[in-house]
Every structure is written in structure tokens, then in C-alpha cells.
Image (tube, grey):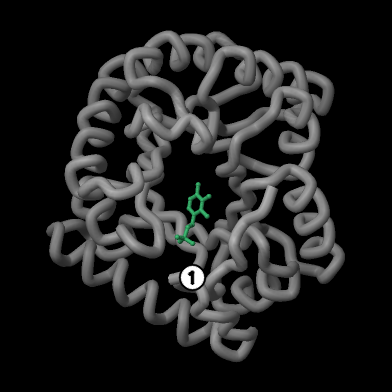
Amino acid sequence: MTGAGRPGPARLGPALERVRTRIAAAEAAAGRPPGSVTLVAVSKTWPASDVVQTARFGIVELAENRAEEAVTKTAEVAAAGVSGLVWRFVGQVQTRRAPAVVGCCDVVESVDRVRLVQALEKACDRLDRRLDVLLQVDLDGSDPGRGGADPADLPALAEAVAGAGRLRLSGLMAVAPRGADPARAFDRLAVLHGRLLDDHPDATTLSAGMSGDLEQAVAAGATHVRVGSAIFGGRPPVSG
Ligand SMILES: *Cc1c(COP(=O)(O)O)cnc(C)c1O
């Protein structure tokens, strides 16, 4: 995936078509209804102009993983006259960045600690708004840099969100561990999601699967797949 280079705006349409075809095939293979999986385009590192292009091709759901970039890009896209998008934050949120994230995003998928729940609630209070959140699950344990809560901590974290008046618990999010079999990781995630649903029946969202493993995620029941490089092209190596 890396080094694939940037497709350029003219190629975003065909790239999106290929991803949509993959999702449709995965839905069919899993015996799931067509259109049951939502494609979230992860636009991190790519310019607002690319988001404007994908919007022309019908993409409504976008995701970002850095607060500053999200603040800037959402404003640029709005200034370009594109409205009605749903911005999802999928990166680690420092508590001091919670106000910035709440100010520009509609959903935070990466809630992994009670302190962050409190910071998001406070930021929502100040802006007098509500926020959909997903709990991010750490399926790995050996890679703390990627964020996520220990599965054992999910019930308490879910209670914290349920008790926060401004937040709505929408479901779970996870990234498959590097080097592991994604099918097994996502099956485990689906079990955790089932348990969450026992206590929080409205938490129906399961955000899993990226460019390299969306088929396995759809097979395991993902409702949202987060796809970056297969749409926009390979990202330069992340620094800092
Ligand atoms: C970057 C990112 C994605 C998309 O990854 P690709 O492999 O480019 O599709 C999905 N989820 C999260 C949390 C990400 O940071």
C-alpha cells in the first residue's frame, strides 16, 4: 500500500468504485443485505480538495485522526461549499484537544478512557451540543501507541458514556493488530460487541476494517469500514 503514490483527483472516482465493488462483494459473501455497510473515507494527510471530489462521488462520511488537521480541513471543505458531511474522529484524542475535536467532528470513534469521556462531555457542554461516540477496543495489548481500551474495561467505560448526558454510545471501533489474522481479531471484536449490546442495545455501530482487511471486517459484522489508502493513495510515512 505504501509508495503507491497519489491517484490524483481524476482517479478518485475509479478508486472509489473499486472499493464500493469490494464492499458489495463482501456483503454478498457474508449474506448481508446490499448497502448494509457504510463506507467511511479516511482523508487524513490528503487535502480538502480531495474531500470535495469524493463528496461529488457521493461520499458523506469522512474520518480524520489528528485534531489540528481536522479543524483546518473541515473548515476548508465547508468554505468550498460542501455541506452535509459527517466527520468522524478516529485518532487518539489528548484530553486538552477534546474541545477542538468536538468543535469540528460529529462522531468520536476513539474513546478509550474515562478521563476522555469527561473531557468530551465538558467540551459538549460548553458548545451546547451532543456527540456520538464509539469505544475503541485494543485487540492487541502489545501496541499501546495505537490507543484503545482493554476489553476488560469496556463495561465501565460504556457506563461512563451512558452517564454523560451529552454523549450517545453508538458502538465499538477497533484496528486489527499488526501481523495478526484480521478475521480472528474481528471475530473477537464481534463477541465484545455482542456483550456491549446486551447492556446498551442502541450501540449498534461496529467500525472495523480498513483498506487491507475490509472483507474480513464485513464478514464479522462491521457496519462501518474506514478506508484511506485504497481511495486516496498511499500516504507518505508518518513522522512525529
Ligand atoms: C488511517 C486509518 C484508517 C485507514 O487506513 P488505510 O489502511 O489507509 O485504509 C482506518 N482507521 C484508522 C483508525 C486509521 O488511522
Visible in this render: residue 196? yes
Answer yes or no: disc 1 within 8 Å of ligand 1.
no
Residue 184 placement (x, y as % from top left): 18, 42
Position above or below: 198 against 66:
above
> Looking at the rendering, in which quadrant would you find the N terminus?
bottom left
Q: How many marks?
A: 1
* Callout 1 secondary element: loop
Residue 229 placement (x, y as % from top left): 50, 68
Q: Residue furthest right?
A: 79
Q: Which residue is mark 1?
A: 2
Q: Is residue 144 left or right of residue 213?
A: right
Position above or below: 1 against 177:
below
Give the residue drawn at x 48%, y 25%.
Answer: 169
Give the residue drawn at x 52%, y 35%.
Answer: 145
Q: Residues within 10 Å of mark 1 (few under 14, many from 20)?
A: few
User: Looking at the rendering, which quadrant does residue 189 occupy?
Assistant: top left
The answer to which of 86 and 215 lies nearer the viewer is 215
Give the residue drawn at x 55%, y 59%.
Answer: 42
Give the residue drawn at x 56%, y 43%.
Answer: 90
Position above or below: 50 against 160:
below
The answer to which of 29 and 94 lies nearer the viewer is 94
Residue 50 placement (x, y as % from top left): 67, 74
Q: Is residue 96 left or right of residue 46?
A: right
Visible in this render: residue 171? no
Residue 123 placement (x, y as % from top left): 77, 23
User: Looking at the rendering, which quadrant does residue 94 occupy?
Assistant: top right
Position above or below: 112 against 183:
above
The answer to which of 165 and 238 lies nearer the viewer is 238
Q: The disc labelled 1 sits on which kind of residue?
A: Thr
